[in-house]
């Protein structure tokens, strides 16, 4: 082979190598180009997710508007409706249900507050003033404003109370409530007269208010108690009335007993109220309010001590109902009065 042939052969090999390299480079992208492609794909996927979220948010906002309209409609139909609470002492709020499964607290807090303010103004611009818990329209337990002396001349003085609408047909005004021992019930005469604690939690309504309610209309009284074992019992008397402060809030009238706790309150009938600073019991040398750590209609001293110390312990100083658990402390107690049907 001559030199020219060798040179042609070498050029042909170089050309083929060059073409092969170019083809390989075209098939395999540079690293920078590959990263840009992957980033573009991620951006496209993110854009699609954002679009889906926008659509979902739109649906949620539409449901929110629907819920707001439904709540406003319910409140307008029932202007006296208020937030209410359970009657077992835990006082957990209950709210009107939504019309769908979406549980949005924002809708409740914003629209419900606005609507309730309007409902409150409407109620007080009308002639509808509930005189007792029987006349509360919504039928749900909770804090309410009643007007015991409302008549054609006007609403009279308002009274803030807690209405129990669950026990025995509802309509009860809670005058005593205990469930965790946070409030001290070993109080002075002045405190028992005026009331103490917070309505909706542990509290005593006040002897003066109880007196005015029981002399305005005939009232019955009910006691509900729960042990630390979780068992509940009750007692009910068909009539209940106490005198005023000049008569030391004497337990003047007490009707017929029914219930499962035992007829122990009859022992206190006719007695004046006693506190650690006002001794009106039958003991000559003992102040029963000091002995039992509670204000009550003590005789010598008492067979029930629902205002005694709170705790899962036994003794005369603890809250007990003698005929049920002897002197064992009670976990929850509630005393309620209700205007009788005969007085409606």
Image (tube, helix red, strand yellow):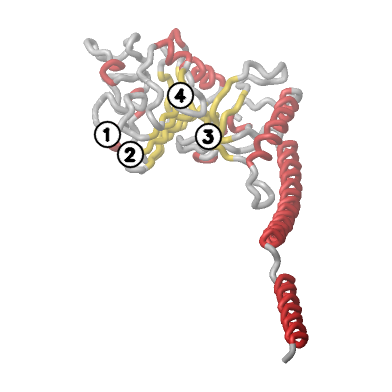
Q: Nearer the viewer, residue 238 or 248?
A: 248
Q: Mark 2 or mark 1: which is in front?
A: 2
Task: Answer whether labels 4 and 1 touch (C-beta < 8 Å).
Answer: no
Q: Quick one: 307 or 341, which is closer to the camera?
A: 307
Can residue 148 be seen here? The reply is yes
**Label 1 crowd (10 A; few <14 / some 14-19 / many >=20):** many
Q: Secondary structure at mark 3?
A: strand
Q: Which residue is mark 2?
A: 228
Q: x%, y% of residue 284?
A: 23, 11
Given this view, does label 4 or label 3 mark the residue nearer the observer?
4
Q: Residue at x 26, y 34 (%)?
A: 326
Residue 223 is situated, as x and y percent measured from the top left of the image, at 42, 33
- Given contact means CB atoms under 8 Å apart, are the residues at marks 1 and 3 in contact? no
Which badge, 2 or 1, comes first in the chain's sequence?
A: 2
Q: Within 10 angstroms of label 4, few (less than 14), some, or many (20 or more) residues?
A: many
Question: Distance between the Cα atoms at labels 4 and 1?
Answer: 22 Å
In this rendering, is residue 171 above or below 272? below
Marks 2 & 1, CB-CB < 8 Å contact: yes
Q: Quadrant of residue 204?
A: top left
Residue shown at 38% from the left, 41% from the top: 232
- Which residue was labeled with disc 1? 328
* Left-right relation of 146 to 111: left
- Contact (Cβ within 8 Å) of mark 3 with mark 2: no
Q: In which image quadrant can residue 309 be found?
A: top left
How far is the residue under mark 4 from the one under mark 2? Answer: 20 Å
Residue receiving disc 4: 203
* Horizontal and vertical percent position of residue 181: 37, 28
């Amino acid at each position: 082979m001559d030199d020219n042939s060798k040179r042609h052969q070498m050029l042909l090999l170089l050309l083929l190598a060059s073409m092969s390299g170019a083809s390989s480079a075209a098939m395999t992208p540079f690293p920078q180009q590959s990263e840009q492609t992957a980033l573009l794909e991620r951006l496209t996927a993110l854009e699609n997710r954002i679009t889906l979220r926008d659509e979902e948010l739109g649906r949620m906002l539409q449901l929110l508007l629907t819920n707001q309209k439904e709540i406003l409609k319910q409140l307008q139909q029932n202007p006296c409706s208020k937030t209410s609470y359970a009657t077992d002492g835990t006082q957990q709020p209950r709210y009107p249900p939504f019309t769908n499964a979406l549980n949005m607290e924002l809708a409740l807090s914003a629209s419900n507050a606005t609507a309730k303010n309007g409902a409150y103004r409407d109620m007080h611009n009308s002639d509808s003033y509930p005189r007792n818990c029987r006349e509360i329209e919504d039928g749900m337990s909770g804090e309410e404003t009643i007007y015991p002396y409302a008549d054609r001349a006007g609403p009279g003085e308002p009274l803030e109370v807690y209405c129990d609408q669950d026990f025995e047909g509802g309509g009860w005004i809670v005058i005593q409530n205990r469930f965790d021992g946070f409030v001290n019930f070993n109080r002075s005469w002045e405190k028992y007269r005026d009331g103490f604690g917070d309505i909706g939690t542990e509290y005593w309504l006040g002897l003066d208010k109880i007196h005015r309610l029981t002399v305005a209309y005939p009232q019955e009284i009910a006691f509900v108690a729960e042990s630390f074992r979780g068992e509940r019992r009750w007692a009910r008397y068909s009539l209940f009335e106490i005198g005023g402060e000049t008569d030391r809030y004497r337990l003047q009238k007490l009707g017929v007993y029914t219930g499962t706790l035992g007829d122990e309150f009859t022992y206190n009938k006719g007695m004046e109220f006693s506190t650690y600073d006002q001794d009106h019991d039958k003991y000559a040398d003992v102040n029963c309010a000091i002995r039992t750590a509670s204000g009550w209609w003590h005789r010598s001293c008492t067979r029930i001590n629902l205002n005694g110390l709170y705790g899962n312990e036994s003794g005369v100083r603890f809250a007990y109902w003698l005929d049920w658990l002897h002197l064992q402390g009670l976990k929850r107690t509630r005393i309620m009065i209700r205007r009788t049907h005969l007085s409606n």
